[in-house]
Image (tube, rainbow, N blue to C red):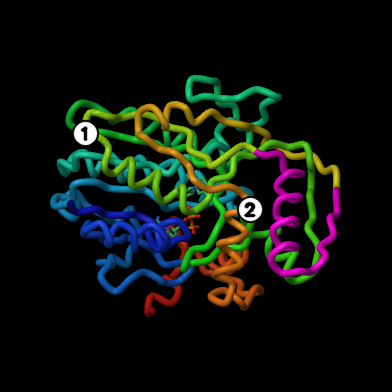
Amino acid sequence: MRLLIAGGAGYVGSALIPRLLERGYSVDVVDLFWFGNKLPEETGLLNKDLFDVTVEDLKDYDQVLFLAGLSNDPMAEFSPNKNFVYNAAAPAYLAYTAKKAGVRRYVYASSCSVYGYTVNELYDETRPVASAYPYGISKLQGEQAVMNLADEQFSVIALRKGTISGYSPRMRLDLIVNTMFRTALQDRLIRINNPSIWRPILAMEDAISAYIRVIEAHESISGIFNVASGNYTVGEVGDLVKAEMEQQLGNKINLEIRHQQDFRNYKVSIDKAKNVLSFHPQHDVRGIVGQLIAQMSRFSDLNNPAYYNIQVFRELEKGISSHSLGKPAGVGR
Ligand SMILES: NC(=O)c1ccc[n+]([C@@H]2O[C@H](COP(=O)([O-])OP(=O)(O)OC[C@H]3O[C@@H](n4cnc5c(N)ncnc54)[C@H](O)[C@@H]3O)[C@@H](O)[C@H]2O)c1
């Protein structure tokens, strides 16, 4: 099976692709390499904007995965106009082009942030979505556009992922558990901005298995699926990170509890993914921290700007022309 992954050089793609290669898939990546390139040598590289991908380019692929765009709220808020182009128009363009090229399946990286601010209820995929902020709105627009194209010849699957955490060769330290891990390591402190807010957390290892289940799902399957390892309050995430790090590293870690307002609060049901995709998460917050500790020598330069999307993005924005967000960074390995 031949796969093309747009945005495959990012945090998710860089952890997923070695596993896809291991399973015998042929994988090519189209990416602007904003955060460099940590992909295995066997990955085919197309160093360009996915808006420049043509029907001809996609003719030989069985499946196309979209993992590109602006992947968090700070980037989206820093540049709302680029956010809507890259998160809403880009996945729509790529799905349209893939369908025209005869690709059989399109997989879209959606996000639980489409649920916005909910109160004390477990949300499944049939519940209303109501994000009022650029990232959540644009992820929903992208999702709606690609889902519209699904038919018997063209399977479309959207994964509404919880916040991913854990190790990837292209590391990010701006995601909830990873951030707590970093401050615990550097400052012996975990800051909790709002302990009562709910977040579905998705361990990288479970994200990888969700993508594998999707790629290998029966061709008749299309649809939207919530995927998470578990639902936690941010306060509980802090307690679990603290407990695991204290136990494994032997240092006392302090908590700083704040009560800041947050515009995202949701917990999700993953029953549909369990029943239809056979997705069964195996990891939890303490397991994520254990994995980060085991891999920490691979990202020991904790202040590397490449680990913080907004820092790289601000620099890219300085050199922007039209919708193209600047030159690829460090394509060499
Ligand atoms: N990381 C999470 O917690 C999370 C949670 C839910 C959903 N998602 C979604 O999953 C996807 C992957 O997330 P990530 O954390 O790996 O992101 P990332 O920011 O690490 O990587 C995104 C990659 O896409 C590339 N890219 C962006 N726009 C492009 C374009 N127009 N053409 C070619 N390449 C382009 C970038 O160069 C980068 O390599 C994103 O769509 C994100 O919105 C992520």
Name the side, left or right, on which 244 lies relative to 255.
left
Whether 287 is drawn above or below 318: the answer is above
- How many marks overall? 2
**Secondary structure mostly seen in the magenta stretch:** helix
Whether 120 is drawn above or below 38: the answer is above
Q: Secondary structure at mark 2?
A: helix
Percent x, y for residue 188?
Answer: 80, 67
Name the one closer to the observer, 137 or 268.
268
Percent x, y for residue 283?
Answer: 53, 48
Whether 157 is drawn above or below 3: the answer is above
Residue 255 placement: quadrant: bottom right
Residue count near mark 2 (Cα–Cα under 10 Å), binned few <14, some 14–19, many ≥20:
some
- Can residue 308 be seen? yes
Q: Tell me which amino acid carries mark 1.
A: Glu
> Could you tell me which residue is drawn at 32 percent across and 43 percent down?
93
Q: Tell me which amino acid carries mark 2.
A: Arg
Name the one closer to the observer, 310 or 253.
253
What is the span of residues highlighted in magenta in the rendered image?
232-257
Q: What is the distance, in whole Å, between disc 1 and disc 2 at their CAs?
A: 35 Å
> Could you tell me which residue is drawn at 49 percent across and 53 percent down?
204
- Can residue 314 be seen? no
Q: Which residue is mark 1?
A: 219
